[in-house]
Image (cartoon, rainbow, N blue to C red):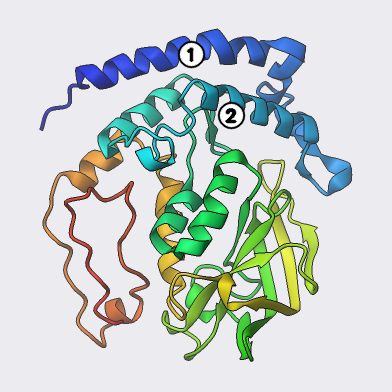
C-alpha cells in the first residue's frame, strides 16, 4: 500500500493552511477570542446562568468562522457537488481531518465540539439518502444556511447502549402520530429547530425493527426540555426531554416506518468521520472482502441494526448488504 500523500491533496493542504493563516488566525486573535481555546475555555464557552449551554458570544464566533470558510469554498468541501461541495474522497477527507487535528486546538478545528472550517454535515447526507423529495426540497437549503437544525433524540433514561429497548412510543391516530416518552443526552437541542425522535411504532422491546425516526418541531405542544446535563467537558448541549402527546403528521416520518435505526447508524458513521484518523481508514479500506453474514436466529443476527450506507465510511464500490435478520 502506498502511504504517500497524493500531490493534489498535498496542494489542498497548503491552500487550507494559507486560508487559516489569512482568515481564521486573525479572527482567533482579535477581541481576546483566544479565551475560547486557552485555559479559560470551559468558562468562556459556557453560559452557566442558562443551564450550561454554549454562550452566545462563543456561538457567534463559530458562526463567523463558518461564514468565512463557506465564502472561501472550504466549509462544504466534503459534501457532494450538488450541495456546493467538492466530492472529496474518503482518502482526501481522512488526510485533511488528520492535518487539521495535527495543527492543534484552534478556531480552525476543534474535536471537542466537532467544529471545523471543513464542515461535517451528517444531517445533509441523512436527508439525501433517507428523505423524501418534498423533505429534501424543504430541508436542504436550511441545513446549509443554518436556518434549520436537527437535534438527535435516541438515548433514554433507562436505555443507552442498546437502543432496541427504547420506551418512547409513536402511535397512529388518524393521519397523525402521537409521541410519548423521554430522551436523555438529546444532543444539539439548545439551537435546534427540530428533533429527530426515535420511537417504537411496532414490534417488541429488543427488536431492531419497529423503531421509526420522526422529525419533531422543538416548539410542538407537549415537547419539553426539562434541563441540560452538565458534562465532563463544558459547555453542554445534552438535554433531558419529555414528550407528552406530541402530534406530528406523516410528513414527519424520516426514512422508512419501522426502520429508523438505519438513520441512527448513518448519523453515527457520518459524525464519527470528523474524528477518524487516516490509520482508521487504511485499516478499514485495506480489504474489500465482505464481512461474514450473521446466521438467522444467531445473536449477531438479532443485534443487526441497519444497512451499511455511510458514504464517508464506505467507498462507492463497496456493496450495500442488508442485515440478514431484517
State the residue at coordinates (46%, 34%). Answer: 76
Residue 230 lies, in percent from the top left, at 74, 50
Q: Nearer the viewer, residue 33 or 69?
A: 69
Relative to 27, 312 lies left or right: left
State the residue at coordinates (41%, 59%). Answer: 266
Residue 326 lies, in percent from the top left, at 31, 82
Bin the neighbour count of mark 1 within 10 Å (Cα to Cα): few under 14, some 14-19, many 20 and up. Answer: some
Query: Nearer the N terminus, badge 2 or badge 1?
Result: 1
Can residue 244 be seen in the rendering of this structure? yes
State the residue at coordinates (38%, 23%). Answer: 99
State the residue at coordinates (22%, 50%). Answer: 316
Q: Which residue lies under the disc numbered 1?
A: 19
Residue 283, quarter of picture: top left
Residue 279 lies, in percent from the top left, at 27, 36
Q: Quadrant of the N terminus?
A: top left
Disc ID at residue 66: 2
Relative to 173, 101 lies left or right: left
Q: Is residue 207 above or below residue 15?
A: below
Residue 52, quarter of picture: top right
Secondary structure of the residue carrying numbered label 2: helix
Amino acid at each position: 500500500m502506498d502511504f504517500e500523500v497524493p500531490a493534489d491533496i498535498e496542494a489542498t493542504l497548503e491552500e487550507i493552511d494559507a486560508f487559516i493563516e489569512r482568515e481564521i488566525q486573525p479572527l482567533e486573535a482579535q477581541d481576546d477570542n483566544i479565551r475560547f481555546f486557552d485555559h479559560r475555555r470551559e468558562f468562556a464557552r459556557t453560559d452557566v446562568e442558562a443551564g450550561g449551554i454554549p454562550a452566545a458570544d462563543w456561538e457567534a464566533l463559530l458562526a463567523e468562522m463558518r461564514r468565512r470558510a463557506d465564502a472561501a469554498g472550504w466549509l462544504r468541501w466534503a459534501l457532494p457537488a450538488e450541495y456546493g461541495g467538492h466530492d472529496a474522497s474518503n482518502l482526501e477527507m481522512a488526510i485533511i481531518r488528520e492535518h487539521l487535528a495535527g495543527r492543534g486546538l484552534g478556531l480552525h478545528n476543534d474535536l471537542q465540539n466537532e467544529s471545523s472550517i471543513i464542515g461535517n454535515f451528517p444531517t445533509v447526507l441523512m436527508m439525501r439518502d433517507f428523505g423524501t423529495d418534498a423533505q429534501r426540497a424543504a430541508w436542504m437549503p436550511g441545513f446549509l444556511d443554518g436556518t434549520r437544525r436537527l437535534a438527535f433524540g435516541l438515548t433514554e433514561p433507562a436505555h443507552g447502549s442498546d437502543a432496541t429497548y427504547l420506551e418512547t412510543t409513536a402511535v397512529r391516530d388518524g393521519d397523525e402520530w402521537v409521541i410519548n416518552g423521554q430522551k436523555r443526552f438529546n444532543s444539539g437541542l439548545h439551537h435546534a429547530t427540530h428533533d429527530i425522535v426515535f420511537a417504537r411504532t411496532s414490534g417488541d422491546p429488543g427488536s431492531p425493527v419497529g423503531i421509526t425516526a420522526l422529525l419533531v418541531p422543538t416548539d410542538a405542544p407537549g415537547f419539553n426540555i426539562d434541563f441540560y446535563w452538565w458534562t465532563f467537558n463544558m459547555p453542554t448541549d445534552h438535554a433531558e426531554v419529555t414528550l407528552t402527546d406530541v402530534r406530528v403528521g406523516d410528513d414527519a416520518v424520516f426514512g422508512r416506518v419501522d426502520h429508523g435505526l438505519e438513520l441512527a447508524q448513518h448519523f453515527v458513521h457520518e459524525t464519527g468521520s470528523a474524528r477518524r484518523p487516516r490509520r482508521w481508514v487504511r485499516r478499514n479500506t485495506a480489504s474489500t472482502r465482505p464481512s461474514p453474514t450473521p446466521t438467522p436466529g444467531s445473536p449477531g443476527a438479532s443485534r443487526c441494526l441497519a444497512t451499511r450506507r455511510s458514504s464517508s465510511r464506505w467507498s462507492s464500490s463497496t456493496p450495500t448488504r442488508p442485515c440478514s435478520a431484517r
